[in-house]
Structure formats: C-alpha cells, structure tokens
Image: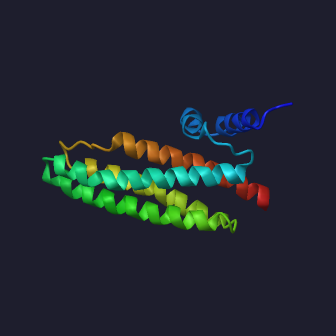
Amino acid sequence: MISISHQASEFITQSCEKTSFKDLCISILESSKAVDLLNLTKEALEIALSNANGVAKSIPELQNKATNPHTKVALKLCEEFYENSISYLNDSMKAIEDKAYYDLIAWVTGDISNAAHCEDALTEYPGTSSPMTAINTKFQQFNAIILHFLYLLQKQNY
C-alpha cells in the first residue's frame, strides 16, 4: 500500500515537472500534502500571499538602507506594487473556491507584472541597481508556476 505522504510527494513532483521552474516549484511545495491540483493551487496561492506580505514588510528596511534618492522612491513604488499583489492574492483565495479561473489568471498575471514593474523602477536610471532582483525574480517565477496550475485547472473544468 502506498502511503498518503508518498502519494502527495509523487503528485507534487509530477505537477512541478510540467512547469517552467520545476526546481523552484518542488522546493517551495515539497511539504504539501495535496493530492489534487485544486488543493495544490490553493496552497501555492497561500504561499505566494505569505511571500508577498513578507516582501512588503521588508521594503521599509530596504528604504532606510538605500543611499540613492532614486532607489528610495522606486522602493516606495515597489511597496505599492506588492500591496496590489497582496490584494490580488487575497481576492484569488476567494475566487478559487468559486472556480473563477479567468479572474484568477488575470490577478496572477498582475502579480507577475507588479514584480516586473518594481524591478524596472529600481533599474530605470543609469547607475542604479536593484536590491530586490532575486526577490522579484522568485516572485515572478512562483506566480508563473501558479499560472500554469490555473491553466490546467481551467482546462479540467471547461
């Protein structure tokens, strides 16, 4: 008999293999107990929300450390972008229960754009560098994984 945890682990591996960022997917979702795509996507949205909250809370500290005035302003924009993502993710947590996949896809795509806009703001002026490149990249990639799951869910339900 196959254990539930082994079954969940196999499911996570198989689901992540189909994404563009399989190693990130597995590392973030490896402790999931989900055995179906809907619950895996719910967990992924919860993790993304937690991550976005953490990023938004860390930005004021980055602003305090920044010496370049442009970087300080850009970080304020980043804070607004991540607050928008938090709003999208909160809405997504409700919408997934209703299987509102078009809304979910729009909001998760918005999360990807928000991280890209943050990065663009931080690197817009010559000579400036982004203290958030790794954070923005990981957030974009993880949301791309969620987007992949949402497309699969949408396909299953229509």
Q: In this figure, which colouring scheme has been used for the structure? A: rainbow
Quarter residue 45 falls in: bottom right
Rendered residue at 27%/50% (across/down)? 122
Quarter residue 81 falls in: bottom left
Q: Position of residue 136 (x, y in %)?
A: 39, 46
Horizontal side of residue 141 vs 126, given as left or right: right
Does residue 35 show up? yes
The answer to whether residue 139 is above or below residue 108 is above
Horizontal side of residue 106 vs 121, given as left or right: right
Rendered residue at 69%/40% (across/down)? 15
Rendered residue at 63%/48% (across/down)? 148
The answer to whether residue 147 is above or below residue 17 is below
Q: Position of residue 88 (x, y in %)?
A: 50, 64
Horizontal side of residue 1 vs 67, given as left or right: right
Total number of numbered discs in the rendering = 0
Say which of 105 and 23 sits in front: 23
Which quarter of the rendering shows the C terminus?
Answer: bottom right
Does residue 124 show up? no
Rendered residue at 13%/53% (across/down)? 69
Which quarter of the rendering shows the N terminus?
Answer: top right
